[in-house]
Amino acid sequence: MIVATATDFKNNIGKYLDLSATEDILITRNGKGVAMLTGVVDGVMAAFREMRGILKKGDDRDAIREERLGKLIDKGTD
């Protein structure tokens, strides 16, 4: 993982976009992580790998999103 300050990222966005194809980029502001830039294919696959065991066969991203949003809404009404 590459760590870049928000200023460095802003000044060198092209470089970091190229690097994001192969590595995650953690963007920091005042020493704290504020964003993560990952390559599209790797980022999607990494998210699905992290959810291994949570997904049911045949689930898709829209179904997962709806389920998670439903849980957040339910928490907000408690």
Image (tube, rainbow, N blue to C red):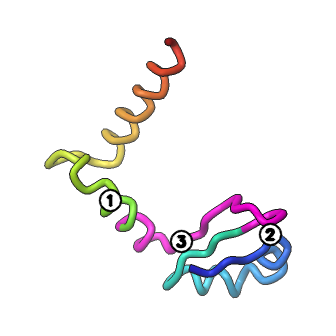
Chain-order first, disc 1 or disc 3 = 3
> Which residue occupies 71% across, 83% down?
14
Q: Which mark is residue 38?
A: 3
Q: Helix or strand or loop: what does disc 3 sit on?
A: loop
Q: Are marks 1 and 2 in contact (CB under 8 Å)?
A: no
Q: CA distance from mark 1 to mark 3?
A: 14 Å
Rendered view: 59 above or below 42: above
Which amino acid, by three-letter code, is at mark 2?
A: Ala
Mark 2 surroundings: few (<14), some (14-19) or many (≥20) residues within 10 A: some
Mark 1 surroundings: few (<14), some (14-19) or many (≥20) residues within 10 A: some
Q: Return the residue at label 1.
A: 48
Rendered view: 52 above or below 12: above
Chain-order first, disc 3 or disc 2 = 2
Which amino acid, by three-letter code, is at mark 1?
A: Phe
Q: CA distance from mark 1 to mark 2?
A: 27 Å
Q: Return the residue at label 2.
A: 6
Q: Helix or strand or loop: what does disc 2 sit on?
A: helix
Q: Is residue 73 left or right of residue 57?
A: right
Rendered view: 60 above or below 68: below
| Residue, far front | 31
> Which residue occupies 84% across, 63% down?
30
Quadrant of the rendered image containing residue 62: top left
Horizontal and vertical percent position of residue 16: 67, 82
Mark 3 surroundings: few (<14), some (14-19) or many (≥20) residues within 10 A: many
- Residue segment shown in magenta: 28-45
Chain-order first, disc 1 or disc 2 = 2
Q: CA distance from mark 3 to mark 2?
A: 15 Å
> Which residue occupies 21% across, 51% down?
53
